[in-house]
Amino acid sequence: MADFSSGVIVDDDLDFSAAQGRSKTREAAGAKTAAWGGRGLNIAIGVSAVVVVAGLVLWAMQLSGGMVQTGMRNLNSWGLYITSFMFFVGLSAGGLIISSVPKAFGIAGFGGISKVAVMSSIACTVAAIGMVVVDLGQPMRLWELFAYSNLGSPLMWDILVLGTYLILSCVYLWAQVRAEAGKMSHTALRVISVVALVCAVLVHSVTAWIFGLQQGREMWHTALLAPWFVSSALVCGTALVICVAVALRAAGYLKWERANLVKLAKLLGAFVMVDLYFFGCDLLTEGFPAGSGLEVVAMLTTGPLAPYFWVEVIGCAVCAVICFTPALRTNGLLVVGSLLAIVGIFCKRVQLLVGGFQLPNLDYAGPLTSMQHTAWDSGLSGIYGGMVYWPTPLEFGVTLGVVALGFLIFFLGLKFLPLRPVEEASPSK
Amino acid sequence: MRYGFVIDQQRCIGCHTCAVECRFANSVPEGTWWNRVLTEDGVFCDTCEGDINEVSLSYVTVACQHCENPACTKVCPVGATYKDPETGIVCQDYDKCIGCRMCVAACPYTGVRSFNWEEPKYTVGFPTGDADAAPHQKHVVEKCIMCRQRVAKGEEPACVRVCPARARFWGDLDDPESEVSQLLKKRSSRQLLAEEGTNPNVHFLV
């Protein structure tokens, strides 16, 4: 702990006035930085690559043998892939927003983690896109999205915004490296950060609209969904940045002031409170008229989705307590709190996805087949009595493969890109 | 032109003939029903509600509602499901569908849209019904298309032709002289989930 109590805030966000003069040393330092990574990182890259390949094999199995091997059917037509898609879009937020807000508004940042944070955003965005691709029945027809685009479809909006977001994140990372090398003006970097920030907010809103604009699903159809997706994204994104920064500091990749960790923790606490507040507003609005919305509240609090609801609420509350109590803000507890927040937001994604299918609009008895639900032979009560969806091992495997792809990209970034804070890598000031 | 169905719930005997003929005429894959006969009152198929003094039993046949304001066509990213401007039929283009299942999530009528989760199998081992019905494909969404191959030839949909109780009617809802329009004028009717604002072109006489 003593190493980090020097009180000097290393800030890579602003003040490039002296950058020109130092650019030579910085380039040399950059070359040194790029070569970081010992045996551990190589092993991590190798393991991720192997898991990615295993995921690809499982995906090929899913496509050849049919999606009948998944837990999805007509009555629960989306599953773990779309849950994870929502989750990773959310996770990608943190890095980009943590990094771009200080630059966009010209305020003090969070220390030398800016570039690493954006790298985590890029990795999460790639994973999110991967989740949509493995969910498609006909991935070979992806080109049609650009040939026959129905620009009225929220899914089309999402594809456009997500693609832009990925490209922008890469451009933004590149711009930061250039600016540090003194080859890009401060104004240009600031403009890019504003655009990136707007795009980040859009990406979460549009993802929310895939669900929120559908009048047929009681649980999804609420105007609150878009701002709520932004707040949830900020929660798990900030939590991810805390975990990554603490881990990289422990691994000796970067030095990071404790003051910055505390700043991030307070921010995380605030985001968690906003997210819980939104949840409270939504539950009250759904439940108060005691109409069909009451079914949603019952499903979440006492019904099949109760475990996910309570893990989210309690996990986020504990996280907020850790973030707001100075005595509890130790490295270990902050990581625990962040992980609780990340798990909590994943549980929220599960509630949203499964909750959309858990309450059928037409629940009359009729012919049931294995194409409508995996538990078709136990009747409507068997289908809707418990959780309407549970993934198969194949789905877990493919999902793991896509997650590994995100890790692979992040590790490769650590190994080959100059992501370390430049000030720390070049002590010769 | 706005083709639609009028279904007389007072006449429907819940025999499933329309549902079976639909599968036969369109060679619908194993495990998939485009049109289903649901029991409205009891908890299980063909069970009633009430006690010995007053029991009720009625059936509702549910297939694509061919809505005037469809939720599905709006969300399809590639326009694989679309409303035919000439007939009002909500169509499905198997060659275009990317299998994202956005339309399944959007449709408020639970279970109307089906996805071919595996390579389509014929129930009797070989294709049946209309030779000009579009062949089924793996990993795409399908649903009732109002037998558009028959409608194009001036014939009525298969389910209407075979109904033994003569409970199903089909025609142009825009034409005030058509049988369906006349029935709607004379009898009281309802639409399924009218509160969703989709304005179905399937009406139930009650």
Image (spheres, coloured by chain):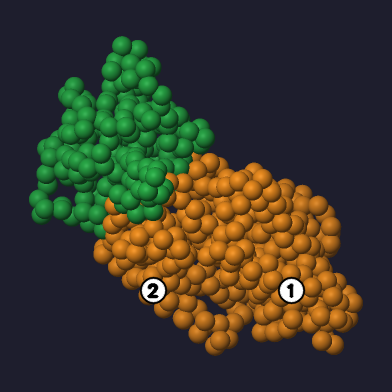
Chain colours: A orange, B green
- Residue farthest along the top direction in this orientation: B177
Q: Is residue A266 left or right of residue A286?
A: right
The answer to whether residue A119 is seen in the rendering is no
Mark 1 — on which chain does it sit?
A
Left-right relation of A294 to B143: right
Residue pointed to by mark 2: A393
Q: Secondary structure at mark 1?
A: helix
Q: Is residue B72 left or right of residue A31?
A: left
> Looking at the picture, which amino acid does disc 1 mark?
Val
**Mark identifier at residue A318:** 1
The N terminus of chain A appears in which quarter of the rendering? bottom right
| Pointer 2 or 1: first along the chain | 1
Q: Nearer the viewer, mark 2 or mark 1?
A: 1
Provide the secondary structure element on which disc 2 rests: helix
- Report, in whole angstroms, how far the alpha carbon at label 2 lies from the one at label 1: 31 Å
Residue A326, picture quadrant: bottom right
Quarter occupied by residue A388: bottom left
Q: Residue furthest right?
A: A7
